Image: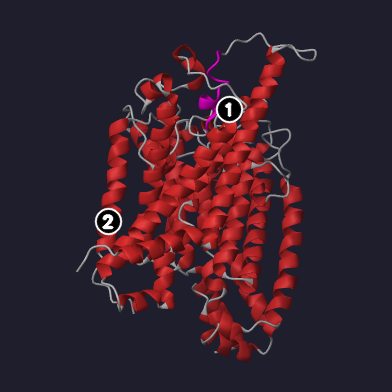
């Protein structure tokens, strides 16, 4: 089998690595969409009034910025955080797996460490994008199943039910385009975060990499700073819904720069790393 | 075979309270407690300035003496600072595990337990480790809570909470130790600190037992947060779905009073503590015949 085909096989293995995070993600997608449907039924709205965008917002809505002056207790977005933990774990397992055995053989076949690193990088990017596509697919199927409207626009009812900031009045027209831009920006930011995690995996260990990326998401839930990546993963915090919200396009540019930097730094690091030692401890 | 060896227990407690992870966990938790106290004091001073008419604006709103008092601003009640106190209790299920809860898995991997096994039976090893984890995990939550009230006390009034100002606090009569809060707030602090100590202590013991079953360290670290998040999600929606008056039954929300969910009532809280205690004890005992190789 050629190195390229081995690489593809490896990619498939990385995507399917460990059913647990995929099952957790799928269960969370379905559960959060079911909660949205149930809340709609509570306020007497028919399921048919739900749009595809509403269902997407159910799992990537997050929470609006916390304002201390409101005096209300801060309630962390547990559901959003749970999904993010699953999303980050999906590409983690394949990152440093098989380095001492199969991976070493593959590395020799490929003849270049940069090619090997690029393949791992591609696995990470693909796995993260697959997570977003899976979420969209489940929302799409749910929308078809309940007979909802197949538009990315988010309705005022969903904004109210999902506890978005409603102080800015009704949802502006053309919101569907903004949601689409958000999805691209959020997927890009997830990819950047996963790439950073991959680089940290080789620089330190899987535990450190996962802890750092999870900590960045965790602090994003609390603080509205633009440089925290989690803010770009919450629809409720985008400029489409709050005047001082984050700009998904700025997030996209930042994510691309971060991913590129990770590719270069990680590649240079991988070029001189002792992969036997790293591989032996990959499951720690 | 004896159930507990005092030398082994002393060694375990010394290791639990003198390792680097314990200090890191204490620095983070005490840092959050001090930050919360700082925000509550700042908020109180700003309120005082408005009440006294300092500057060009004054406030005519009367909120009673309770809401601006030290007891109401304590992290568990959270009237002074709802933000950092929420953060503190959100990370606590993970933070309380840092000192020693993952040590059994570590020691098995390094061979330390196998060496211990040549001198002690499995039961003394597990029991002393269980107690050390219980104490260290409990200390991570209780010491910052005590520190918080100690810092608040010199800066804010320590008068007895007035039940007529309950509108601003939201402690209903059905809530756990609500009577104690308005009649004997110091006892309320002692009881809540003890409850958090026990909850986090048993939680640490439960995760210690699970650590011997889960080999993947990333999953092991994620596990506590995932379990608490799932428990909370189910707890918050299951009562709504069945349209019944619910109660809190998850670790994060039971740790403090001000969580915006159901009431924290006595019987479910006691059941949750018992559940943690029984589950952790059974899981620990399930390793009594382990070979440690």
x and y percentages locating residue B97 in the rendered image = 45, 55
Q: Which residue is drawn at 74% across and 11% down?
A: B53
Write down the region rendered in magenta.
Answer: B64-74
Disc on the earlier residue, 2 or 1: 1
In the image as oriented, which residue stretches furthest toward the front? B7
Q: According to the image, label 2 marks what residue?
A: B281
Q: Is residue B31 above or below residue A17?
A: above
Front position in the image: B133 or B150: B150
x and y percentages locating residue B177 in the rendered image = 36, 27
Q: Which residue is drawn at 71% across and 47% down?
A: A248
Where disc 1 sits, the SS reads loop
In the image as oriented, which residue stretches furthest toward the left? B1
Q: Which residue is drawn at 71% across and 70% down?
A: A263
Q: Residue at x 70, y 77 (%)?
A: A269
Label the magenta part by its dominant secondary structure: loop
Q: According to the image, label 1 marks what residue?
A: B80
**Residue A264 placement, left or right of B103:** right
Front position in the image: B229 or B208: B208
Front position in the image: B74 or A2: B74
The chain carrying label 2 is B
Residue B71 part of the magenta segment: yes
The chain carrying label 1 is B
């Amino acid at each position: 089998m050629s190195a390229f085909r081995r690489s593809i096989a490896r990619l498939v293995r990385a995507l399917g690595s460990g059913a647990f995070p995929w099952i957790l993600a799928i269960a969370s997608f379905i559960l959060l969409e079911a909660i949205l449907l149930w809340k709609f039924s509570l306020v007497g709205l028919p399921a048919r009034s739900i749009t595809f965008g509403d269902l997407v917002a159910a799992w990537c809505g997050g929470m609006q910025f916390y304002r201390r002056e409101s005096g209300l207790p801060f309630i962390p977005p547990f559901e959003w955080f749970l999904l993010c933990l699953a999303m980050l774990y999906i590409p983690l397992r394949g990152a440093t797996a098989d380095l001492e055995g199969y991976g070493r053989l593959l590395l020799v076949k490929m003849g270049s460490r940069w090619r090997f690193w690029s393949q791992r990088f591609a696995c990470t990017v693909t796995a993260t994008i697959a997570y977003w596509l899976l979420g969209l697919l489940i929302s799409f199927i749910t929308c078809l199943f309940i007979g909802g409207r197949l538009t990315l626009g988010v309705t005022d009812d969903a904004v109210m039910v999902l506890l978005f900031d409603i102080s800015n009045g009704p949802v502006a027209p053309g919101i569907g385009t903004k949601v689409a831009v958000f999805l691209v920006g959020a997927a890009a930011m997830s990819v950047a975060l996963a790439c950073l995690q991959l680089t940290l995996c080789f620089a330190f260990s899987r535990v450190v990499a996962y802890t750092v990326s999870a900590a960045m998401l965790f602090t994003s839930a609390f603080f509205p700073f633009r440089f925290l990546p989690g803010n770009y993963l919450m629809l409720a915090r985008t400029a489409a819904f709050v005047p001082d919200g984050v700009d998904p396009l700025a997030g996209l540019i930042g994510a691309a720069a971060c991913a590129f930097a990770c590719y270069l730094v990680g590649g240079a690091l991988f070029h001189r790393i002792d992969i036997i030692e790293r591989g032996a401890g990959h499951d720690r | 075979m004896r159930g507990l060896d005092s030398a082994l227990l002393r060694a375990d407690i010394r290791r639990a309270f003198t390792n680097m992870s314990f200090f890191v966990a204490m620095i983070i938790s005490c840092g959050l407690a001090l930050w919360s106290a700082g925000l509550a004091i700042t908020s109180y001073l700003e309120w005082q300035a408005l009440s006294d008419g300092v500057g060009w604006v004054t406030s005519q709103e009367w909120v009673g003496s309770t809401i601006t008092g030290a007891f109401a601003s304590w992290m568990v009640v959270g009237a002074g600072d709802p933000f950092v106190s929420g953060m503190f209790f959100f990370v606590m299920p993970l933070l309380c595990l840092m000192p020693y809860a993952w040590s059994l898995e570590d020691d098995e991997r390094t061979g330390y337990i196998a060496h211990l096994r040549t001198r002690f039976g499995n039961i003394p090893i597990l029991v002393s480790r269980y107690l050390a984890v219980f104490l260290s995990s409990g200390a991570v939550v209780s010491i910052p809570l005590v520190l918080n009230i100690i810092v608040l006390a010199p800066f804010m009034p320590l008068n007895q909470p007035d039940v007529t100002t309950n509108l601003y606090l939201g402690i209903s009569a059905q809530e756990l130790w609500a009577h104690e809060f308005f009649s004997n707030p110091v006892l309320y602090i002692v009881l809540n600190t003890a409850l958090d100590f026990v909850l986090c202590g048993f939680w640490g013991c439960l995760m210690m037992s699970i650590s011997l079953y889960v080999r993947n360290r990333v999953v092991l670290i994620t596990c506590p947060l995932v379990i608490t998040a799932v428990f909370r999600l189910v707890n918050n929606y299951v009562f709504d779905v069945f349209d019944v008056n619910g109660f809190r039954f998850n670790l994060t929300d039971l740790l403090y009073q001000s969580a915006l969910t159901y009431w924290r009532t006595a019987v479910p809280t006691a059941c949750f503590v018992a559940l943690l205690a029984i589950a952790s004890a059974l899981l620990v005992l399930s390793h009594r015949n382990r070979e440690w190789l």
